[in-house]
Structure formats: structure tokens, C-alpha cells
Image (tube, grey):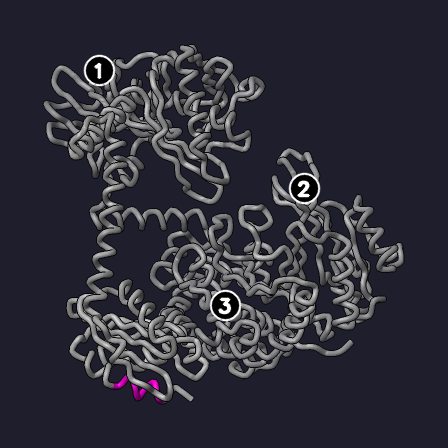
Amino acid sequence: MQYRGVNELRKLYLDFFESKEHLRMKSFSLVPHNDNSLLIINSGMAPLKPYFTGQEIPPKRRVTTCQKCIRTGDIENVGKTARHGTFFEMLGNFSFGDYFKTEAIHWSWEFLTEVVGIDPDRLYPSVYVDDDEAFEIWNKEIGVAADRIYRFGKEDNFWEHGAGPCGPCSEIYYDRGEKYGTGPEDVMGGEGDRFMEVWNNVFSQFNNDGKGNYTELVQKNIDTGMGLERLAVVVQDVDSIFDVDTLQALRDKVCEIAGVKYKDSEKQDVSIRVITDHIRSVTFMVSDGIMPSNEGRGYVLRRLLRRAARHGRLLGINHKFLGELCETVIEGSKDGYPELEEKKTFILKVISEEEDKFNKTIDQGLTILNDMMDELAKNNSKVLSGADTFKLYDTYGFPIDLTKEILEEKDITVDEEGFKAAMEEQRVKARNARKTTNYMGADATVYDDIDPTISSEFVGYDKLTNEGEVLVLTTEEEIVDALTEGDKGTIIVDKTAFYGTMGGQEGDKGIITTPEGEFKVETTIHLKGGKIGHVGEMTKGMIKQGDKVTLCVDEAGRADTCKNHSATHLLQKALRTVLGDHVEQKGSFVNPERLRFDFTHFQSVTKEELAKVEGLVNEQIAKAVPVVTDVMTIDEAKKTGAMALFGEKYGEKVRVVSMGDFSKEFCGGTHVANTANIRLFKIVGESGVAAGVRRLEALTDKGVLNYYAKLEEELSNAAKAAKVEPAQLINKINSLNDEVKALSSENEKLKAELANNALGDVSSDAVEVKGFKLIATKLSGVDMNELRNLGDKLKTEIKSGVVLLASDNDGKVNLIAMATDDAVKAGAHAGNLIKSLAPIVGGGGGGRPNMAQAGGKNAAGIDELLSKVASELEGQLN
């Protein structure tokens, strides 16, 4: 088998599948596009998912790529083993409903044995245990002996990810020989290093409904992948990915900078491998625009970079070195990824600045951490407190993962829950310092100080007024004994008819009163421990802890909210009826004014579908269906066929809201007693909010009446402006459109006449340049459209030659040049003519040989420009 480098193997693979009529596509960015399920691209097929799902039409039904990928799931093992890495390149060939198993298997074998030259006797295919079709192809068509084809179960040879397309796999393993292991694990399917998987054919032929039921796909797809580094390990016959040519060059550069030798010390080798791997990931991530930060993919970048910098310290490197390594990465990979060279300056700058930031604090931070570890040793403790871990993070920029890794070497762990608590406390302090606390409850921290044994009971399903006892009073900053007029705060009582915001339903408004005071409730919220907080302002008098109070919910607001909430249940059922059972709620919001409903659907809802949905909901409203609520166990509720609502948290007992046979759902919210109470339903908006998620906005009852009243007012105002009755508005608009069209046509004719008059008879002014006529003249007040018309007219008149027109249009210049076909054959080029002359009038432009145009800012230069046209044209003509 011939030695081949990583870059050569990449090219061989892509060239091979191009010869099999595949479209070669560049690697996609590491940043997923319109895919919220991924933080960073982690497989070759990930960027192609829209083609597999049918959401997008592929540019060709056969595609091949070499995709850069990053996986950080095993980051703790990177460096400790010779097989783990965060960055890798995935070679892939894909079919979207084109070829299937036969071609995929034949081509994988052809590439490995004939193109790369791997000994066929060292290759061992595997198939899914029930995939007789693949077995037959390997055995009877490829000619692999039956005892060398291994059948593996679902865990190893069946690809699926929840519901959706899935299918069996057929992998190809390479026997690296006895020098890589002779133990019981060094067999096909074992965990040893002798047999290495190099190729995986995924046959996407089934659809999993999520319940383990599989049906054949109409469009069967092929998703095959092979790790480029793994292939290089086989072809170059080396121990690990860190020994293949491109990584070896990088590994050797690490050793050179550190002044150490690889395989002299296992401890040093760990650091060498960590740096070698991580600097590749960091370089590619920055080239794709990922910037260091403390969250998301930016945190992944920062974590990898700082981990590499810290391992450099362990090797004795006490100066900046990551940029130097970055240049080695670029040099080794720029053949396959030219963007690395193009963005080299930017990449080096980002990495250099981040390394600077870390270097400024790492020494001091390590000193502090060593002191902390000494203190733990004195106390015989093996756990670093959350507060100390946070101090290292907050003051010295140590990600918690870095701290954990350093401590792991000393068999010390971290109090992660304590660290999270310290992080949250800092966020609270920062918000308070900025004085941006939203006292509606989202950010206030005074609630954390309330006795956790205190709770509230909601009694408002069948009443809007109740008596209760004040348990807790708070202001924005503290728990208090009383609230007085003008104070903003929160009141917590033992029992309340006020519904707290939950499950998409906005909390109630209303008033809380005593003989001595009145509190206006602006919203009601749920707090930890089953407490319900009434947030608002004291409007008069005083309310004290222990007072008996009367709670009165705003009746009209609750009634309108109930109408919108019940309509949401009807809407979900109507959507499932019209669009299909794939519709599932992804979020909702109801308040007195309107309702919003987010649901799964993979295209916009048509006007016809919206009309059907709206009609179904109004049909159920007109039927005056009783709305019945039953309380039962979750198991009982599921047996009734009730649907669970998004965002709702359920206890042992649940409320099931039924509207006849039409709708039945889990729901803890409040509802109308009868669908007739909703009165009217109108959809007023449809939009997309995420991939596969649509949003409907709708109104009920008074909201619908107000909506139509506003439309009627707008229609009346439009009719008034048009000076007709509303019934005649359409005819009036059509009439006005016809009038505008006629006037526009007349205007164009007048403009053409004016342009012709401005041009005058210039045919006689034509000069001869090397046997061709040239008309170069100046006009005034002619726009570009008319200039083109005049140019066409003059070109027809002269029959053979070049026309250049310059118009002074309110101080700005319009230029156009045209050349006849015979002039173009003789060398005339309108585009080059314009390009060379336009700067004289402060402009620029160009175009085709037979026609070009430009604009300019300096009308004073037109005469000079015209004086040079002949000499420029003369230089062009043969």
C-alpha cells in the first residue's frame, strides 16, 4: 500500500466521487445554519439535514464533501489516549433518493482497494443483523467470504436519532495486524486497537414514528462517512491520529517550542496531544467567525484555547506560543481549506489576544489555586468549595472545566452546585447594581428570603372573590411588616382567587382590600415552594402582615382571558384536523387582549387552510359545547386520550379540560363554562418563528369586534379620501389605476419626445475613426432609461460604429456607450470605453463590449470626457 498524506487522501476521495457524478461541495461552516439543535457542526451529514428531510432541494442528488467537525463530548479524554480528538475531518458521499446499497457498497470497496490500494484481505465488512440485502451484496457481488462478514446488532449497526428517518449500517474494518494487539479484545467487534473502523455506510430506508414502528421510506438516502485522520492512520501505518503527517508536523512543532521529545514521558505526551488537538479546533473555529466568550460556542472556543495554554505551561512554555502553532495548522491544512490562509491575520489576532488575556492572570490564579489546595490538605478535604471555584473563574478567568482538570490530578473534586449558586448570586448583584430589576418578579431576589414553608392555595377556578390572610409582604428590596400608600411590593396570602402566570396564561389583575387599605394587583406570579405573589402598588391606606383581606379579581379581564384560553384548545384541535397529527404545541400565550399559539409545522399555513381552521373553531363555538373539567391521576387522564399542554408542570392529580368530543387536554388554566361564551374567533397573523415551528395570533369576542370596527373605519377613511361610498371603492381604485397607467404612458412619450428634441440631429456630426462612425454628444435633463432608448436609435441610424451619450441631469452625470457588432469584432469595447472615461466626471462603471453605462458626480467634466472619446476608441480598434 502506497504512503499517502492527509491532503492527498482528501483529494483522492473527492475526485473519486466526482468521477461517480457527485457534486463536490465545500465544507460548511462549523457554525450551524438554521439548526438550533446543534451548537457546532459535529458530523459530515449535519449541514445536509435539510436535503435529507426534504425541507430543501439539494443542488444535485449526489453530493460529496470533506466536512470539518468538532466534538467535545469526550474532551476530558483528549490527550489521555491516542485516539480521542475534538477536531476531525469527515469524508462523505451522499445520495438523496438516487443510488442506494449496491452502489454505496461497491464504491466504498472500489475506493479503498483500487484507489487507495488497501489489501482486500485486511478489510472486514459488517452489516446489521437483519440486513440480508447488504450481506448478499458483500458476499455475492463483492466476493467477500461469508465468514468474514460480521452481523452486528442495533447498538452498533443501526443509525437512528429518535423519530424520523433511520436505517441499518454497513461498516468496513481494517485489520492493523498483530503488532497492535493479540488479546481477547483485539478481534472484530472488540474494544482493542487492532481492528479499526474506517468506513460507515448508513442506509436511510425507514421512518421511525418515535414509538418503535418502522415504515419504508419512499425516498431512500445514503449517508456515508469516513474519518480522514483514521484513513490516514491505516494508510500511513502509524499508531494514532497524532502520528499522521499533518498532525505529526504540528505535534513536532509543539515539541520544538517546548524543548521536549514525544514519547519520552507519558505525562508530557498528554500535554503534547492536548495542545496538538486543541490548536486545530481553535484555528478552524476562529476562521468560521466564532469568538471567545463565556457562553455557547464561544465558551467552547475559550475552553479549548485556555486548556491548550495551560498545558503549554505544564511543558515549561512560559511565553506566547499558540499563534506560532496556529501558523503550522494553516500551513498544513490550507490546501483543503484556503479560507485559513485568507483569514490568517484575523485568526492570529484573535488567538493572540485571548492568549494574552489568559497569560495575564494564569500565574496568579495558579498560585491562588495552589494555596487553596494546601488549605484543603491541612483540613483533609478533597472538595474545593463553590465559592473558591467561582473566585478562580470570576477573578482569574479559569473556566470551571480547567479548575476541575487541574484538581483531578490531585484527586480533588469541585462543589459544582455551590459554584452555580455563586454564579447566580453574582448575576443578581450585577442586575441590582444596574438598577434594571424588573419588579414584576422575574429578577427580584427578595423572594429568596421568604420562609420556604409558606405556601398559597389557588381557589379561583369557580369564584373571583375570596377572603384570605396576609402571610408575607415585601417591597422591592426586603420583607416588611406593612405596605403603605405609594409603596410598590408583593403580597402573599394563604388562599387566593388570583391565577398566577403559568402554562402560557397571563396572571390576573384586580384589587386586595381591608377596611384600612387597598392594593392594586398589576400581575400575579408563581414563586418557589407553591407561593403565589400578587405584585402591584398600595393605592391607599395600609395593609399589614396577618391582616384579613378581600381579594377581588378583575372580572372582565379574567373573562376575556378565559375566552382566549379556551379558544386556544379549540385551535390546537382544529390545526391537527386540517394540517395533520404532526402538529404539536411548542408554546402559547393568552391574556385578555389576544392569544398566540406556536406549533410544529414545516411550511407556512395557506390562506385556505387558515380559513378551514378558523371555520372549525367558530363551528364549535356556535355549537355551544359545555366545557367540563375533571380532576384525575395522570394515568387516568392519558387513558382518556387527553393531550398534555406545552409548558405545564403536572403533579399526581391533573385537570383535564374537555369540550365535547372535539378537544380534551391536560390544563391547569381557567376556561369558559361553554364554548358559546367565546362568541367569535378570528386569526389575524401567521408566521414562522423557528425551523419547523409556526405561530398563529388570534382574537376572540370583543377583540374580533374591535378588529372589524378598525377595518371599517379604515375602509371609510379610504373611501372618503377617494370621494366615493365604500361600496364603490374597488371600482374607484381600478379607475384610478387605469388613469395612472394612461398618464404614465403619456409621460413616457413626452419624455421620449423631449429627449429626441434635446438630441436634435446629431447624425451629421458623426466623425470617422478607423473606418467606423463615432457619435459622442452631450444632452441635458435626460435620465438613464431615455438615454438607452436614444442610444439604440442612433446605433440603428449609423449602422456601423460607436455611440457615446453624456447627460447632465441636475448636476449628476449619466453615461452610456454602445457599439455595433462589426465594431466590436474590430476591437471596440463599450465597457472598457466607459471604464476609462467615467473617472473624468467623478464616476465609475462598465459593461459588455456592445453596451455599457455609468454614473458620475461632476457634470463640469462632460466636455473634457467627450473630447477624449475618439482617441480612446482609436486605441481600441484594430
Please tell me whether mark 2 sits on a helix, a strand or a loop: strand
Q: Which residue is mark 3?
A: 284
The quadrant where residue 621 appears: top left
| Residues in magenta, as a range | 868-874
**Alpha carbon of mark 2 to alpha carbon of mark 3: how far?**
38 Å
Q: Which residue is mark 1?
A: 550
Q: Is 355 placed above or below 77 here?
A: below
Q: Which residue is mark 2?
A: 218
Please tell me whether mark 1 sits on a helix, a strand or a loop: strand
x and y percent of residue 618 in the render? Answer: 40, 19
x and y percent of residue 348 in the render? Answer: 42, 75
> Residue 472: in sight, yes or no?
no
Residue type beneath disc 2: Val
Please tell me whether mark 3 sits on a helix, a strand or a loop: helix
Q: Which numbered disc, 1 or 3, marks the residue closer to the eye?
A: 3
Say whether disc 2 or disc 3 marks the residue closer to the N-terminus.
2
Residue type beneath disc 3: Phe
Residue 672 among magenta residues:
no
Residue type beneath disc 1: Thr
